[in-house]
Structures are given as structure tokens and as C-alpha cells.
Image (cartoon, rainbow, N blue to C red):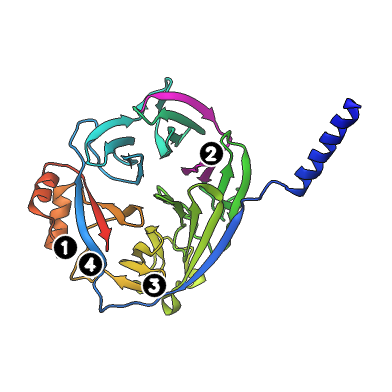
Amino acid sequence: MKQYIAIFVIYLGCIVYSCHPKQNTFSSTSTQYTWNENNKISIFDLFDTIQYIILEENPQAYLQQIDKLIVQDDKIFVFDHSGRNQVVIFDTAGRFLYEVGRKGRGPGEFIRICNFTVDSNYIYIIHDIEPSIMYHSVKDGSFIKKKRMFFSPSDIAVFKNGDFAFTLPFSPAVSSPKNKIVITDDQLNVKKYLFPLTPQDNEIINKWSPFLYTDQSVVFNSFYSDTLIIFDRANPDIYETVCIDFGKHQIPLSYRKKEELDNNSWLYINENVIVNDSFLFGKFGEHFYLYDRKKQIAYPANNKENFPYTRVHYATNNYFLSFFFNRYNVYSSFVEKGMQRAPLHIEKQMEQGNCVLIKYVLK
């Protein structure tokens, strides 16, 4: 009798499970915006304050460039690809904490870092030469382990569910996988390829860091494009495709494959355009704009204002984070051309060689 009861319970469990299948978390939405400019409102009118974070001068943290920046658990993680070729970590006040990356061929050492990402558990380092990920402690940067890969990515993003996203140096001109992004699980098993290449895609698909971070999302765009992909930072199966209709300023499809454009009036999503719930902020074409997503209005940084930043690297719904030139002579040359001066104490820090982050706090 007990045997029959046990069989019945198992059977009933199977029926219940079949009636409640595992939920599919995949969710893809699309949003179309129209480009309208408003030259009557200053971009500064939309910011409450502009704050400065001086990154502490340190022989182990002398930055020549910021190619990627992520804020995670009250730390600022900065990647200097072309200069130090290291990931340098500061606290949110700009005090140097530690660096990750030591050249060599031993455990935890590298020939050249390609890119990085970070979560609450690890700092993940990918190589330019060897297809692998090195895992470092987020507490002190110490090396923990290394995993081999069967492909060589150009950038990496990690999500809260453990999945990774990678951009690869794909080109329509050569034989290669015909997608821009590959998604893997935490063991680096491929789950899917996303966003097929088209004949109109520029062959310079990737920048140093095609992925930008906010506190809620990971943002991707390719070269000379009118489209942003906004992944939910919790799960890469949830993303929004944002397409901007630039109207008469749209780049003709036949021109999108060129390395350089000869028309300054064309608009496109340039190097680093960051996103929060309310705005798109960064360089569109050759000019800087703050685009209101609800009103669908672009507010330009007028030439007379000479916005004091190069690239926007990180965002929350309350602020955007960018950086100043960390070479005083470069900064001085821009000031001579009319760029707005920084406060005196900031200028002195730059003159000493320090890098300065700029925090644009929204109203």
C-alpha cells in the first residue's frame, strides 16, 4: 500500500510541476526616439551641482588615460589601457587603495590586459593575447584563479545572475561569427549570440570599451550607430534596444563603413554615450548633448560653454561621472581655446599630474 501511495505522490508532483513550468526571464523591448534640439536651454540648467573627485597621486596609480570606469561597492575601478595597462582602484573620495595587473608569465601575471569588469565577488581581467579570464579578489586585488576561453573578446561585462557578455572584434570583411555580442554562463559555456552584423555596420565595431556601466544597466553601442543596447545589470536576457531617428542629420548607410566622416552635421552615437532612466548623455557626432528621454529633446553644450570633460563613463539616476585631462599642458591648451576653467584648487591638482573626476549631479 505504501508503495502505491509513494507512486501516486510522485505522479502528482509531476502533474503540479508540469502545470507550473520554469518561468522564462527573457524580455526584449524596443524604443524609438526622434531627435529634436532645444538651443534655448543651457545644458548647465539641468545640473544641480558639478563636483570634483581628485584621484590621489601615487606612483602605483599614475594614470595616463581612463578607458573604462565602474563604481562598485563604494570603490571606483579605473582601467588605463594605453598607459599603465592596469586596473587601479580608489575609494569614492579618490584615495588610492590598490592596483591589479603585474606583467610577467607567472600565476596572476599577464603580457597585456585587454579589458576588465567587476562585481561584488571578483575583478575579472581578460587578455589581449591569451584567451582567458583572471579572477582577482575585489577586497585587495590578489590573484585567485584563471579560466581558459576558446575565443578572444575585446570587452567583458558580468551580470548579477552570474552570466557574462563579451564583445568580439568581428568584422563584416572577414570570416568570423556574425554577431556583435556573445552571452555565456558563469562557466563560460556559450548560451547565445546576439545582434547579427549587417553590411552597413562599420568594420571598426569595437572601441576600447564598448560596454559602459550604470548602477542599473550595461550599455553597448558600436561605431557610427544610431542604436544603443541597454542590458539589465541583473540579467542579460533582459534588454532594451534604443534607436534614435536623427532625421536629416542621419548618416547615409553607404557612409557608415568609412573610418572617418567628412560631414560634421551628421549625428550618430559616438564614443561614450551613457544612459539613465531620464537622459542620454555624451557625444553625438562631434558635439555633446544631454537628451531628455521623456520629452525627446536634445540639449546641446553650446560652444561658448565649452563643457569641461572628455568622456562620460558611469551614471546613476542622480549623477553622471566623467574625468578631466590629467595632463596640465593639455588642459591649458583647451582653456586657451575657450574651455571653461576649473576651480583653482583643481587646476593645481592637475598641474601636479593628478587625474580629476567630474560628477555632474542632476536636479
Along the polypeptide, which appears first: circle 1 or circle 2?
A: 2
Q: Which residue range is magenta in the image?
A: 141-166
User: Which residue in the protein does label 3 denote?
Assistant: 266
* Residue 149 falls inside the magenta stretch: yes
Q: Which mark is residue 162?
A: 2
Along the polypeptide, which appears first: circle 4 or circle 3?
A: 4
Along the polypeptide, which appears first: circle 3 or circle 1?
A: 3
Residue 141 is at least partly visible in this image: yes
User: In the picture, residue 141 is in which quadrant?
Assistant: top left
**Residue 330 in the image: above or below residue 295:** above
Residue at image coords 41%, 28%: 136
Residue type marked 1? Met
Disc 1 versus disc 4: nearer the observer:
4
Give the spatial CA distance, label 1 vs label 4: 14 Å
Residue at image coords 20%, 57%: 50
Give the spatial CA distance, label 4 vs label 2: 39 Å
Q: Secondary structure at mark 2?
A: loop
User: In the picture, residue 272 is in which quadrant?
Assistant: bottom left
Q: Which mark is residue 339?
A: 1
Residue type marked 4? Phe
